[in-house]
Amino acid sequence: MSTGAVTAADSDLASCHTCCKLSPASLHRCPRCGATLHLRITDSVQRTVALLITATILYIPANVYPIMVTEYLGVPEASTIMGGVVVLVKLGSIPVAAVIFIASVVVPLAKIAAMFYLTWSVARRKLEGPRRRTKLYVVAEFVGKWSMIDVFVVAILVALVQLQGLLAFYPGIAAYSFAGVVLVTMVAAENFDSRLMWDQLEEKNDSSRT
Amino acid sequence: MDNLIACHGCDLLVDVGNLEDDSRAYCPRCGHFLTRYQRDGMSRVLAYAIAAIVLLLVASSFPFLSFKQAGLESVMTLYGAPGSLARYGMPALGLIVATFIIIVPSLILLLMVMISVPLLIGRRVPWMHAATRAVFALQNWSMAEVFIIGVLVSLVKIMSLATVILGISFWAYSAFSICFILALVSLDRYQCWQLIDQLEAQA
């Protein structure tokens, strides 16, 4: 061990992802909880990239199509995610407009970009800043679910405001795609294995020593 | 190797030793959170889970929000939010919303009770492993707190149109989401499995 860092994999131990028990890597199932054991997530980079591409594609209809239809005095008016933000700004609710803009635009785009960067850095064996990249991964994984705010807003308004003939809200097709973006990026984050970054650092240190 | 944890962020083997009450361990190499020890951790899980269950039942029984305009009034319940998506042509989305705000939190709370009670009274139960695996698989898929923010944003969006009244259910659900998060942070993956090991070693 060139850096003095002993990992579980170096000791031929696999850490169970559900119960944290360390078992010989040759076992297929965790002897304590029965979950499937693996040293690293299988095909982590490919799976993550595939899901990220899916999320990117879903993000397009999520923004192009209306997420909600407002019917005022019988006249329907469709609004997209960005349209909703603009309306809030015009109403003078800057803080709420900012919440929606951050949750629906900044967070998903930043999360997709961060995860693409992380998978790229693993695929290209970039070695710098593994601690910083691990932190980035933890943050990206944490913020993902906050993007659901806009879908919940649609659900609430549709349920609450149904004054037929006067004012009513209906869900738009983009709500589906947007919920899809959030779900798929959450699964993508679960499939990324940050330990790969540290493995590459170890391999580099070992080979420079010999 | 009893007190060894492989860091989930970088796979470093860390000896967490015997942690003091209410202390946390972080990975020295990548900074990832490892575990948190609380002597009364399981009691906390049970207490917060029971409180959350009661609050969720209250939240299910009263109006969540009501909306008044020109003599017309409409009322929304907690189940109305996913239900209305289903009614207006998006049953799958309704199911997703219901899963995140009601079904997953309820399942987690039920599983918490099923895990913490046997551990606290020291009795072996056949469902212990399955229930513990399930609770940790589900824990990232609850969005109760996100829903609360969604409610607040909705309020601002329609405040200018009419009078909106926050119902009992809204306050109950807000309190529920706080208790729920406290229960979740009290349930530590590593410590929970250590307790299960201890229980099974005794028998």
Image (spheres, rainbow, N blue to C red):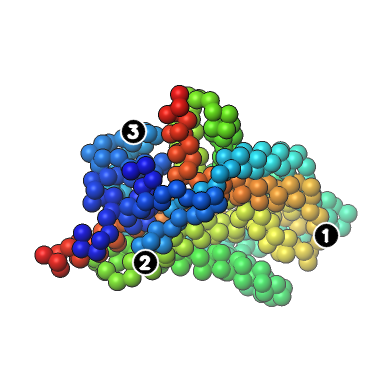
* Residue type, numbered disc 3: Pro
- From what the image shows, is residue A59 above or below residue B52? below
Q: Quadrant of the C terminus of chain B?
A: top left
Q: Is disc 2 on the same chain as disc 3?
A: yes
Q: Give the image location of residue B148, x and y in percent.
A: 66, 55
Which residue is found at the position 37% from the left and 51% from the top?
B15
Q: Which residue is mark 3?
A: A31
* Disc on res. A131: 2
Residue B149 visible, this orientation: yes
Say which element carries label 3: loop
* Residue type, numbered disc 1: Thr
Specify which label sits upstream in the sequence, 3 or 2.
Answer: 3
Q: Is disc 1 on the same chain as disc 2?
A: no
Say which element carries label 2: helix
Say which element carries label 1: strand
Q: Nearer the viewer, residue A65 or A2?
A: A2
